[in-house]
Structures are given as C-alpha cells and as structure tokens.
Amino acid sequence: MKVLVVADETHFYQPDFVNSLIHELKKKNFEIFGSCANKIEKKNNIEKYLISKFYWLSFYEIFYLAFKNITYLFLSYIFPFGFRNIYFSTKSAFRKNKIEFFNINRNINEKRYIDKIKAINPDLIINSSSLIFSDEVIGIPKLGCLNRHTSLLPSYRGLWPVLHAISNNEKEIGVSIHAMTSQLDSGEIYAQKTIDISDNKKILSIYKIAFSISSVLVLEAIDNLINNKPLVSSNTKSYFTFPNKDQWNKFRKNGGKFI
C-alpha cells in the first residue's frame, strides 16, 4: 500500500511524530512518501496569530517560543538529517528515514501539488498539517484521507482545541484520527484516545503527550478504515476558531500556561 504523509514543517512535536509514524508504517511494509507544509495561510497559521497577539503571552513564554524557534532553525541547517534521535524539522525526519518528499507552500490544492500527488498515486493520505484539502485532493487516494486532530471529536473541531478545552475548564482532551471530508474535522472517526488534563494545564506538555500517542492511533485507524469499522462518539459537537480576549482570560483564570 502506498501512503502519503502530509505534515506541518514545525519544530514542535511534528518531527518526532513523523519519525514514529514512519517506523509504524514500515512495520506494515507500506510504501511511504512525504510532503511538508512549509507555509500556512494566515487564517490557519498559529505562529502568525501568536505574533499578532504577543501581548497575551508572558515574557517567559515569548522568550521560550522565540528561543526554541531560532535555535531549532539554526540546528536544522547544521543537522539536516537530525542528530542521533533528535529531529529539528519535519524534513529531517523524512531525510533520516530516506523518504522521498516534496514541499507545499500555503495551498495543497494548486495544480502543481495535485499533479505530484496523482503521480504518487497513493492508496491513503495521512494528514497532520494545517492545510485545507479540496474535494479533488481528498478524492485522489483509493482509501481516502485520514487526519490527526488533538481533541475528542466531534467536540472541539477547528483551531487550537487544547487552549479552548482549558478555557472551558475541561478535565480531558484527546486525539482523534478521522476521515477527511469537505467539512473541517467532520468525517467518520476511526481511532480515538483520551488524555487527562485535570492536573495539566500546560499547552506544550499536552501537545507533547498527544503527538506521542498519535502514530499508534493512526495504525489503529488504518485497520478500522480498511475493515469499515468507524467509532461511534457520544461527545457533543463543537467548533472553534482562534481564541478571542475573553477566551484567553478564561484560559489564564483556569491555570492555563504554555510552558
């Protein structure tokens, strides 16, 4: 089976997830291809949103995020294949595992990218990016597209579910692997796991846990997809965009932190 892995090019957790996912897929003897979303449109770009709302971050949070970005960007040039088992970019994870990949800038639905995907002719696309797929892209792979999302779908569809969950004083969040459709985060769910956040209100810590369990969940989802065994979720449907000032205030009031 041919699998195309699409992931954001970021220093935060995606590289380790991509590396782990590749190893899990290789155990099943899948033929793997990759693509990196280098640039994300502003409406879905968390980094640009944070820069525009820097005044809602503490000085330490600003310093940490900026320092890690600059440091990892520098190290990714020095160690393009990573260093031992440390990956400074999504590309380094693909390179280290000898996976052929291509870059995507902003819009995966452009003809040049659609042509690349059609040339690969994947049976399945696994998405862990902020890109929005058109129906044409979703329709290319024979088995469709699976998306990794950090929430217990159908709750907390959309952007930045962890911050919104803390803002609403939720006691748990989770990871869902679901089929992609024309509606964001709305397809059939094929794997899901809960994460207890009753005593953990740190966004980066929660995402680290979420990404660490995601590769195994993807393999579970593939099995369920092939066997046509979607999960039935009793969670309440909800959708969120980037948080506003009131949601940020609730996030802080409930003990929310980045680090």
Image: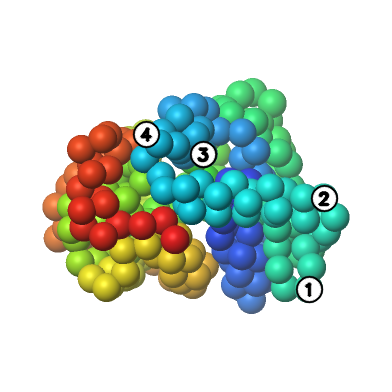
Q: Which label's residue is closer to the chain start, 2 or 3?
A: 3
Amino acid bearing label 4: Ser
Relative to 85, is 183 on the left or the right?
left
Residue lying at the far front of the rendered structure: 59
Residue occupied by mark 1: 84
Determine whether label 1 and label 2 are within 8 Å by CB: no
Q: Disc 3 on helix, strand or loop?
A: helix
Residue drawn 77% across the image and 50% down it:
74
Residue occupied by mark 4: 182
Q: Which label's residue is closer to the chain start, 1 or 3?
A: 3
Q: Mark 4 and mark 1: span between their CA atoms?
A: 40 Å
Relative to 115, is 8 on the left or the right?
left
Residue lying at the far right of the rendered structure: 78
Q: Which label's residue is closer to the chain start, 3 or 4?
A: 3
Residue occupied by mark 2: 77
Amino acid bearing label 1: Arg
Q: Which label's residue is closer to the chain start, 2 or 4?
A: 2
Q: Disc 2 on helix, strand or loop?
A: helix
Residue drawn 63% across the image and 59% down it:
15
Picture quarter containing residue 111?
A: top right
Q: Nearer the viewer, mark 1 or mark 3?
A: 3
Residue occupied by mark 3: 47
Picture quarter containing residue 192?
A: bottom left
Q: Mark 1 and mark 3: span between their CA atoms?
A: 28 Å
Total marks in image: 4
Q: Mark 3 and mark 4: span between their CA atoms?
A: 25 Å
| Circle 1 residues within 10 Å: few <14, some 14–19, many ≥20 | few
Q: Mark 1 and mark 2: span between their CA atoms?
A: 15 Å
Determine whether label 2 and label 4 are within 8 Å by CB: no
Q: What percent of the width, then of the height, locates residue 241?
A: 31, 36
